[in-house]
Image (tube, helix red, strand yellow):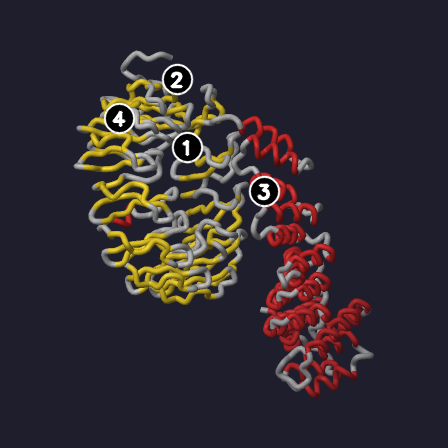
Amino acid sequence: MTMRVALMPLVLLTMTSVRAGRLEKAFKALEVHDYFKARELFRKEVKKHPAAAWYGLSVITGRADNPFYELDSAYQFIVRADLAFTAAPDKERVAIGALGVSHTSIMAQRDHVYERAWEIARGQNTVIAYQRYLDRYPSGPRAEEVRAAMHHLAFQEARTLNTAAAYASFVERYPSSREVYEARTRLNDALYAEATAAQDIASYKAFIAAHPDNPNVRKAEDAIYRLSTPGRTIAQYKAFIAAYPDNHRVPDAWRSLYETYTKDLSVGTITRFVAEFPDYPFMDELVDDYRMASVELLPFRRDGKWGFIDTEGTERIKAQYDWVEGFLHGQALVGLGDRVGTINRSGRAVVPVEYDEVREFAEGTAVVERSGRVGAVDRNGELVVPMVFTDLGDLSEGLSYAEDHGKYGYVNARGQMMISPMYDVAANFHQGLAVVGVDGRSGVIGRSGQLVVPLEYEWIEGFERGLSRVRRNGRMGMIGPQGTILLEAKYDHVGDLHDGLALVVEGSRCGYVDTTGRFVIPKDYEAAQDVAAWGDFGQGRAEVQSAGKRGIINTRNERIVPFQYADIGGTRGPLFPVKKKNKWGFVDLRGASVVEPRYDQVWDYVDGVARVENGGLFGALDSTGKEIIPLVNAELADAQYGLLVGGADRLGVYDATGKLVIPAEHEEVVVINAAIVKVMNGDRSAYRRTNDGGYIWKEAGFSTGTMSAE
């Protein structure tokens, strides 16, 4: 369309009859594309007929089909033509108008030059080409379109370089561009990335000092906080608070310090905390915790929702959850629908109720899972290990094993990968060592990832006790923390260490080795088929067998109970259960009979009370062998907090003296502590006191079916 408009004046020439002269001859030559002649004639007419001459020269230099093509010249000529036409007298305008030169044709030629210049710039599609267009044709109708294209292209070039210098140059050169706002943001981010490339505390501090107004200062402060507290210990939080008082994470550090120090939220720990940290800035919150610290909180249900009451039956946390668990270290698991979180003792949400699973806290963090991915939160509920792993261990000695793309490595409390993923299996660190495995073989690494024990064992227990049991080629032994062989892997069984001794079984004989692997009790005893289940030491005593009879020895291999029993039921109580002629009784620490064998079954002592059974009915003895609970109970559980749950038809609670403190009128009983039990009948529950049997709280609809004192 533009070319047709631009050529319109030439068409008009053929329809206009004018007196033949040099100007007319010039247009005639132009009409037949005789550019050399036309150019020469137009140049000679510049002084006499400037508007028409400049117009003609613009047409020639604006056409690409001749050697004089030069678009910049075409533009300059048409500008001169426009100025000359404006200044021309009416008589001149009429004369050249007869040749097709008018304001309209001049504007059409100018638009032709503009459009051709735009096509060239767009074809080159470079910042330089667009800038050249704007420099030479600032009034062109495409100027804004060209400017937008130039800005976009320049910004893309800056993004490709992605450096602070590139973005700074863009912002400086194109302050009015639409992209300048994003460029400023990217400039700030690039300054941050380049200044903190080392990702150490020094680089983050230097960035803050050099760019105090950069919006990434908070991010730098976050990094300083994270790097200053890798182990999330009290000492690290304390040092951070002292070193960086203006850091916006100081309040978080204070709260984390407090949470770590007082993780059990007991009156004693809170009191000690205040004495050690009198400048704690959140004393109001602490006072609330102090008030709640001595309050026992019990789960209760109302209208299908769960909350917590105190030991007076007063509602402390509103019943609003689908389920709850008891408090542990100051927090309780709660659930809504299929989501899990935690609350503190004041009822405030700590870990958001948005996870599929929340595990118990270990070293100040808890593993959380959502949609098949796991991470970890701190005791404030903040996600400190990102949820990018498929498996994550509890924090142990500041490190957690983590599975990434099918391989295990180790991350710290901030989620930073400290040991690269390269193992098929991995276990927690203990004593600075962790068991790892590749292709079914186990070895041990240190905290820096160095291999301490070669990957040559079928199984390695771990170093919680400073040394480890191992298995190779189906045989067991024992190694030290540097892989030193303490006991050659050639035995059928090696027991766990208790009282500094471990049971060792070889064939039909067994003995005991110490922590150096030396046999301090020779293999003089018979290895009964199930010796691994009962042969370990406990409280300085072990059950052993000789000539088919059982006895008890101490750590010096001295016989405490003679070898005259068919079985021994345990070695940890004040009296030992012994079996003789298919009946069970008890002997004392010297082996003397205290309770003659007369029971079908007895159990070891728990909380100073031992259960006994005859003919399917259960009772209990005290530490002297006295029968304090008669054998009338169809059920009787081991003692908890000095209380035994049992009964004939229904369940009640006995104390350690044998007194029935809660009547046997319940279908289920759970001991909460020495003072409180939870009782259930049907799907309804209640809490009762053990001192008087009274009720603390009853769920609506709860009934015993019998009369009971309130």
First along the sequence among labels 1 and 4: 1
Q: Which mark is residue 619?
A: 4
Instruction: Quadrant for the C terminus, please.
Output: top left
Kind of residue indicated by mark 3? Ser
Q: Counting other residues with Cα less than 10 Å from the Cα at mark 2, is it few (<14), some (14-19), or many (20 or more)?
A: many
**What is the C-alpha distance between the residues marked 2 and 1?**
21 Å
Q: Is residue 406 visible?
A: no
- How far across and down, in percent of the image, does residue 69 sit? 67, 82
- Mark 2 lies on a secondary structure that is strand
Contact, mark 3 vs mark 1 (Cβ under 8 Å): no
Helix, strand or loop for disc 1:
strand
Q: CA distance from mark 3 to mark 1?
A: 24 Å
Residue 695: numbered disc: 2
Q: Is residue 211 above or below residue 648?
A: below
Q: Amino acid at mark 2?
A: Tyr
Q: Secondary structure at mark 3?
A: helix
- On screen, 644 above or below 544? above
Which tag is nearer the camera, tag 3 or tag 2? 2
Residue 256: numbered disc: 3
Front one among 642 and 10: 642
Image check: 29 left or right of 529?
right
Question: Circle 1 sits on which residue?
Answer: 324
Q: Position of residue 230 (x, y in %)?
A: 57, 52
Mark closer to the chain start, 2 or 4 = 4
- Image vertical order of residue 574 relative to residue 21, above or below: above
